[in-house]
Image (cartoon, rainbow, N blue to C red):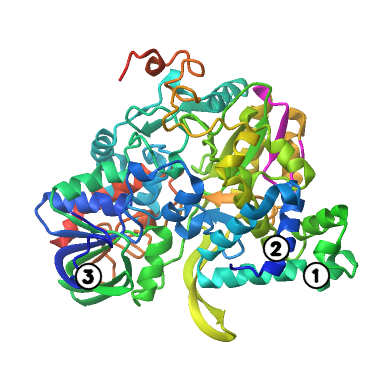
Amino acid sequence: MIFPEKQNELLLCIGETILGIPAENLGDDFIQEINRYVGLLDDYLIKDLKNLVTMFGSRAMVFMRLFKFKKFVGLSPTDRLRYVKSWGTSRIPLLRTGYTALRSLCGWAYYSNDDHGEELGHLGKTIGREKETPTLLSPQFYPNSPLARGDMK
Amino acid sequence: MIITPETWDKNKEITTDIAIIGSGCGGAMTAARLSEQGYSVIIIEEGEYVSKDDFDQNARNLVPRLYRQNASLGTDDQSIRILQGKAFGGSTTVNWMTSLRTPDWVLEEWAERFGLNEYLPEHLGKHFEMIEKRLNVHQVPDYAISPYNRIILDGAKMLDLHQKVLPNNSKDCIGCGSCGLGCPYDAKQDMRLTYLKDALENGATAYTSTHAYQISPESRDRHIVKATMQNQTIRFQAKRVVVSGSAIMSPLLLQSSGLTKGGQVGKNLSLHPVTAAIGQYDSEMHPTYGIPQSATAEYFDDTGYGYWLEAPDLELFLAGVNFPIIGPQRHEELKKLSKSAVIIVLVRDGADGKTDGEVRWRRGYNKQNGRITLKKVPSIRYRVSPTDRKHLMMGLETAIKIMFSTGAKRVFPFLNPSPELTDISQAPEVHKHPFQPNRISLFSAHPQGTCRMSKGKGVVDETGQMKHYPGVYVLDGSILPTAVGVNPMISILASVSRAIELGNLNL
């Protein structure tokens, strides 16, 4: 694992705050995918991301942004969101970079899982299901398509 | 013949007429042209060999295999995400197929500013025709235009903007919507199925999963390319070396090799910076399916700079990563994805006379087992110029207006924080948003220009040969002297084809 197990709670907290999905619904898959994805990056990026997560969760950073001497995981949901947003709109470019990186990482870790597509109204893969999904082979979705009517190969 | 780590015979000393580094547009065209003349050609591709059987529409499986740096490549400050293919066929394996000729005014600008009088429309016309025929470029038929592309045509008409249906390079495309993860139906006529196929049939050999890291010119007719496969070094000895690694990777390879005389390698980076807006409708849009980018609306000013709009298909992971709001509302809004449409705004950058972008190595460090070691890391620096910013925000405003004109109920521009817009009258508000890195989501899939072709100050001459290194050629998107203002696949293919026609690598 790239991130130590003791940071799992922090990662789930960040995911919950950014994505708006309860930590219990993010689950082990979320943590495993973050570790897998980051582990595939170049060394220097892994180092940067590890530093970012540690810094983001620290008391010192929370104090600097919110004047509260608590770790990120110890904040209320409202304060967590306020804290994340304060990174995104900070005058310090590095914090905005951190915000973008965390948002991307969390978004990838949850929504790259095909099992979550259904929640978004995605009708699944087309392979083997071409006529059931919104392709040009489907009369339901493309009634004027000659492919759906069988006029073309 | 295709060599993979599994089929490699462990031969580490290989001699050839031409060694081509990269198998995207530039490398594929060069390989096809030179192999048909009977030259021995070797293609060295860092990415994996992939075929339609690999393209299972699974992002977790495919993104790390098909995209450079797992699709997380970006500028140093992460303010611009750069999507770049890294597989056999380069970015053409994962692009959204838009196939447009370089506009005449761009070619005329190249002649005027860079002395490229051999690249005027009358010279490139036959190359465009030849390429369009080989790639089966055709206009997307009306029945195949997806709902989320139809809104561009309808909205632009209502707003009295110039709009048109776009051509793409497909054959029997069913609109599965997974272009970005490789075409599982072999409908996309990318390089693997066209020019690389031609080259392989002519006897070329492609080494895949092979990373070229150094070029050593020994004389005009003898160059050594060092590469690694499975952590073992292979030495390719070639009469000519062609660098076709893209506008990001080509300058980095040249710099690693010390081939930087003239001081221009890596400079003049253009990106066609992109931002976007997502609109929610009452009706189904199914933005994760359908033929992408089949319509456009565009605005270019008298100088030839401006913006154009397109509607891509939205891989689930792209939606999840890039949806512009955060917090409890985010997932609830994403649940409306099937009734949403995204319009992207692409800008022809360089309106202020030049771009402020560069690709180079920078010093970094690595910490492992408590030890800190210095190492070089790639660096991409880019700042959006004032007029390009203006065009981006004008385009964003137009995209929002198009969405509301076509029935969108709410629109979220890709700003940070993103305002929730509910009425067309709010569209101009985007101009009030601070334009700072990471306060607006920016992307690019079109890096260009870092080994500029020019008769004056540039990296290569009109034949693609490096000015200070005879026998070393650069033939890819990095030679385009300015941003082309259209999706650049056809421009790269035609420019490379023309460069070969002009010089034939001086063979």
Identify the element where label 3 is drawn: loop
Image height of A127 relative to B259, above or below: above
Decide which of tag 1 and tag 2 comes sooner along the chain.
Answer: 2
* Label 2 neighbour load within 10 Å: few <14, some 14-19, many 20+: some
* Rendering coords of residue B457 (x, y %): 38, 65
What's the magenta bit mostly, secondary-structure-wise? loop
Give residue B55's position: percent from left, percent from top. 40, 43
**Disc sitting over residue B470 in the figure:** 3
Is A29 contained in the magenta span?
Answer: no
Q: Nearer the viewer, mark 3 or mark 1?
A: 1
Give the camera-side residue of B151 and B384.
B151
* Residue lying at 50% horizontally and 46% vertically, measured from the top left: B59
Closer to the camera in the image, B483 or A108: A108
Do labels 3 and 2 touch, CB within 8 Å?
A: no
Disc 1: which residue: A61
Location of residue A80 by image quarter: bottom right
Of all residues, the one furthest to the left in this rendering is: B38
Residue type at mark 2: give it.
Asn
Q: Residue at x 68, y 31 (%)?
A: B336
Side of B350 where B18 appears, left or right? left
Q: Which mark is residue B365?
A: none
Q: Nearer the viewer, residue B391 or A67?
A: A67
Q: Which residues are magenta?
A: B405-420
The residue under label 2 is A8
x, y (%) of residue B494? 29, 45
Describe the element under mark 2 as helix, strand or loop: helix
Q: Chain of mark 2?
A: A
Whether residues under marks 3 and 1 lie with C-beta atoms below 8 angstroms apart, the answer is no
Marks 1 and 2, how far apart at CA: 19 Å
Query: Which image quarter holds the N terminus of chain B?
Result: bottom left
